[in-house]
Image (cartoon, rainbow, N blue to C red):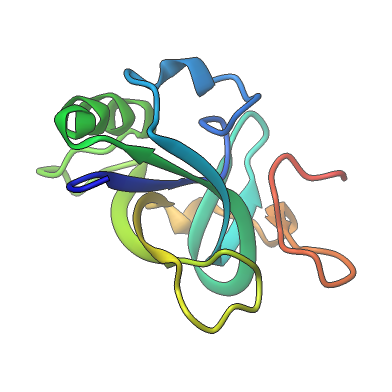
Amino acid sequence: MDGATSFFVYGTLKRGECRERMWPHAPVEIQPAFAWGFLYDLGPYPAMTPGDDWIAGEIWTIASPHVAETLVVLDEIEGYDVASDNNLYDRVQIDWHRAPGDSSAGGTALTYHYARTDRLLAGQRIIGTQGEPAHWPSAG
């Protein structure tokens, strides 16, 4: 997987969700993953921000020849423009983990953090229950 790029997805781009088919190329690999942050339920899609909760998601590993096109597609889906200061989401690099509580990172990945944090409400935050990480869609 030399030159491959990993993406941490936690919402509509995951397997079985409404935007799974929007990936422009098949991944080299998909695996369960966890990252630090806060997760919010915005109804039809979630929002992730920096924080100290475990969030469950997936790592999609994309082969090097397909990364540029994948970035274009995902940036459009997520409302991200590198030249804009009015994004819906910002593309960031994070550490991901193979299991919640792992002290060492499984690697780094690109993900999208919600940029309009002033619009988030405390009641929208998804908090994991009984030691489980937060995930979207939430059970309630």
Residue at 63% x, 72% y: name it.
53
Residue 34 in the figure: left or right of residue 130: left
Q: Which of 25 and 48 is in front in this view?
A: 25
| Above or below, 14 relative to 52 | above
Looking at the image, residue 119 lies above or below residue 132 = above
Looking at the rendered image, the quarter that the N terminus falls into is: top left
The residue lying at 38 percent from left, 46 percent from top is 7
Please tell me in which quadrant of the rendered image residue 34 appears: bottom right
37 left or right, relative to 111: right
Task: Between residue 4 and residue 118, name the one nearer to us.
Answer: 4
Q: Name the spot of residue 10 as percent of width and height, x first.
A: 56, 45
**Which residue is painted at 67% across and 34% down in the image?**
43
Is 78 situated above or below 38? above
Nearer-the-camera pick, 95 or 82 = 95
Quadrant of residue 63 within the rendered picture: top left
Q: How many labels does the image show?
A: 0
Residue 90 location in percent, x, y?
31, 50
Residue sticking out furthest to the bottom: 103
Q: Looking at the figure, which quarter contains the C terminus?
A: top right
Residue 79: x %, y % from top left: 32, 33
User: Residue at position x 63%, y 28% from top?
Assistant: 44
Percent coordinates x, y for residue 96 in the rendering: 46, 64
- Farthest residue in the front direction? 1
